[in-house]
């Protein structure tokens, strides 16, 4: 088959793939695109309520303010204080929580990937917190963090965990890490199980220590899966609502951007709520861009497709056992060269 004909076949496959995606794109336009446009429109208005000085009647309705709801977070004292408090809380819970969850998740995956007695029970025990509904987990931790709860009994002190202050932030972090670290561990485990054991054998022959094998073999090979897992967990943490709300209510120490937007909507301030939601949306888009451009997160699976195309184009690879032997030899050679 000539290169021109192969290129034509690939173009046909690409057009057919887009055709198959049209129903999905249509549904996404309805459930994502339309609400986004509606939120943009709503954010340009502000509910006008008060007493008309001319008539003495209560005035209701929406007033077009343009970008007033967006600029209020920088100019209006009340709106600015609430927004930036929620913004820094969201950032704090995301950065600290996801960092600790990633470390614990990798450790969990390293434990679960080992062949050991009672491994099934270990895996089940690790994944149980992640399977519990978030609001149930929040209420459970609220009981633990009561003044006369288990936490204070174990610590032998009387910390008011669910009141304003650093202890409220710590309570949210502890509950969130306990619940979601197994999520990263589960996805990392899937990546660890794809690593060929011959790579570790070759490194062992070269005299690589377990710590060197982890940094030079395990971590680089599991990085594509781990980066995507951390990205998904980061996006989930940035939208955090039910855990801090169920645990702390509307305390300022635990209020996130999602909670602030929900509260504004509950007060019939839909324009402000839409503006806060769109600020959060822009923040999330920025984080996704950083992960894709800087960390190389392969959220679309394009790297895997390119690797498959490269393998198909190689001569002498892909027939019988020779393909597996050649791939294993290439991988072992790359690792031994990096570990030595």
Image (cartoon, rainbow, N blue to C red):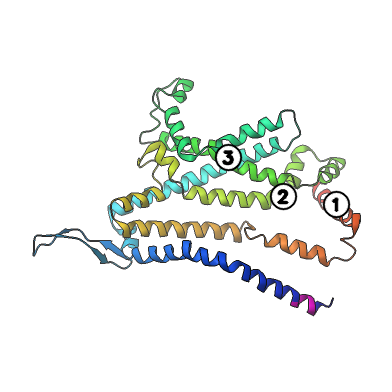
Q: Position of residue 165 (x, y in %)?
A: 38, 36
Q: Which mark is residue 181?
A: 3
Q: Secondary structure at mark 3?
A: helix
Residue 268's quadrant in the figure?
bottom left
Crowd around label 3: few <14 · some 14–19 · many ≥20 (10 Å): many
For the residues labelled 2 and 1, say whether their Cβ atoms are less than 8 Å apart: no
Lower position in the chain sequence, tag 2 or tag 1: 2
Lower position in the chain sequence, tag 1 or tag 3: 3
Gap in angstroms between the C-alphas marked 3 and 2? 20 Å
Gap in angstroms between the C-alphas marked 2 and 1? 17 Å
Name the residue at 62% across, 31% down: 125
**Residue 70 drawn in magenta:** no
Q: Which residues are magenta?
A: 4-8
Crowd around label 1: few <14 · some 14–19 · many ≥20 (10 Å): some
Q: Which mark is residue 220?
A: 2
**Residue 7 drawn in magenta:** yes
Name the residue at 74% across, 35% down: 114
């Amino acid at each position: 088959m000539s290169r021109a004909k192969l290129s034509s076949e690939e173009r046909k496959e690409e057009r057919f793939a887009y055709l198959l995606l049209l129903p999905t794109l249509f549904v996404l336009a309805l459930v994502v695109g339309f609400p986004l446009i509606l939120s943009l429109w709503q954010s340009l208005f502000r509910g006008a309520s008060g007493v008309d000085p001319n008539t003495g009647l209560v005035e209701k309705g929406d007033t077009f303010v343009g970008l007033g709801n967006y600029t209020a977070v920088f100019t209006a004292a009340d709106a600015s204080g609430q927004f930036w408090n929620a913004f820094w809380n969201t950032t704090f819970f995301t950065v600290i929580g996801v960092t600790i969850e990633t470390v614990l998740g990798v450790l969990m995956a390293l434990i679960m990937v080992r062949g050991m007695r009672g491994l099934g029970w270990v895996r089940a025990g690790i994944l149980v917190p992640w399977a519990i509904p978030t609001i149930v987990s929040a209420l459970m931790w609220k009981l633990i963090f009561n003044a006369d709860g288990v936490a204070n009994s174990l610590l032998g002190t009387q910390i008011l965990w669910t009141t304003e202050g650093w202890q409220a932030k710590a309570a949210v972090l502890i509950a969130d890490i306990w619940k979601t670290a197994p999520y990263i561990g589960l996805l990392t485990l899937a990546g660890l199980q794809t690593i060929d054991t011959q790579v570790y054998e070759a490194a062992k022959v070269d005299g690589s220590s377990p710590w060197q094998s982890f940094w030079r073999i395990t971590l680089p090979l599991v990085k594509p899966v781990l980066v995507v897992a951390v990205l998904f967990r980061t996006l989930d943490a940035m939208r955090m609502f039910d855990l801090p709300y169920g645990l702390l209510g509307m305390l300022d120490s635990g209020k996130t951007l999602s909670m602030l937007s929900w509260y504004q909507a509950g007060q019939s301030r839909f324009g402000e709520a839409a503006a806060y939601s769109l600020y959060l949306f822009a923040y999330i888009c920025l984080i996704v861009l950083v992960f894709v451009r800087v960390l190389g997160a392969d959220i679309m699976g394009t790297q895997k497709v390119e690797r498959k195309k490269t393998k198909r184009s190689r001569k002498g690879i892909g027939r019988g056992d020779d393909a597996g032997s050649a791939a294993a030899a290439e991988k072992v050679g790359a690792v031994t060269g990096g570990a030595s």
